[in-house]
Amino acid sequence: MAKRSIVPTVIILVAALAIAVPRTFAAHIEVVVNLGSLRDAHITINRGDHVTWRNASMEKAHLAFATGPDAPQFWIEGTATVTFEKPGVYEYYVHQPQARILHGTVTVK
């Protein structure tokens, strides 16, 4: 009598669980603000993810979102983090007094 291997069954079960189990951990994405430039200015994330803007320029930087009447605005003194709960495209601008206004987008799936 031949023995059956359970390896294919285990692989199929693990793959099915990976697909069926919802994501429980939010991603944390970083946008770096340099003097006159943004690293990763246009990003795509999932609902519930966190985006942190890190001011590496050592200059004042003001972050303002153009989307919605309650769009956040704040100074970035080190880091600032926003959690995105609703799908959509969020435009933002970073202004540094010693540089041009920078533009980026956060697309939430």
Image (cartoon, grey):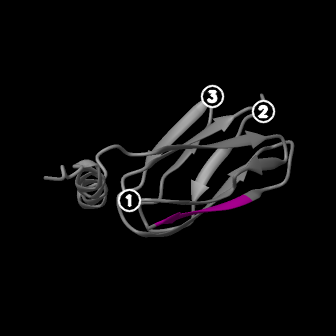
The quadrant holding residue 77 is top right
- Expressed as whole percent of the image width and height from the top left, the position of residue 27 reads 45, 45
What kind of residue is marked 3?
Gly
Q: Secondary structure at mark 2?
A: loop
State which mark lies toward you, 1 or 3: 1
What kind of residue is marked 1?
Arg
State the separation of the CA atoms marked 1 and 3: 25 Å
State the separation of the CA atoms marked 3 and 2: 10 Å
Between 42 and 77, which is closer to the camera in this rendering? 42
Q: Secondary structure at mark 3?
A: loop
The quadrant holding residue 101 is bottom right
Q: Which residue is mark 3?
A: 78
The stretch of residues the image draws in magenta is 103-108
- Residue 47 circle label: 1
Counting other residues with Cα less than 10 Å from the Cα at mark 3, is it few (<14), some (14-19), or many (20 or more)? some
Q: Left or right: 103 with respect to 53?
A: right
Question: Which corner quadrant holds the C terminus?
Answer: bottom left
| x 77%, y 28%: residue | 58
Counting other residues with Cα less than 10 Å from the Cα at mark 1, is it few (<14), some (14-19), or many (20 or more)? some
Between 2 and 51, which is closer to the camera in this rendering? 2
- Expressed as whole percent of the image width and height from the top left, the position of residue 93 reads 67, 57
Residue 44 magenta:
no
| x 85%, y 47%: residue | 36
Q: Which residue is mark 2?
A: 59
What kind of residue is marked 2?
Glu
- Expressed as whole percent of the image width and height from the top left, the position of residue 64 reads 59, 54
| x 86%, y 42%: residue | 98
Between 44 and 105, which is closer to the camera in this rendering? 44
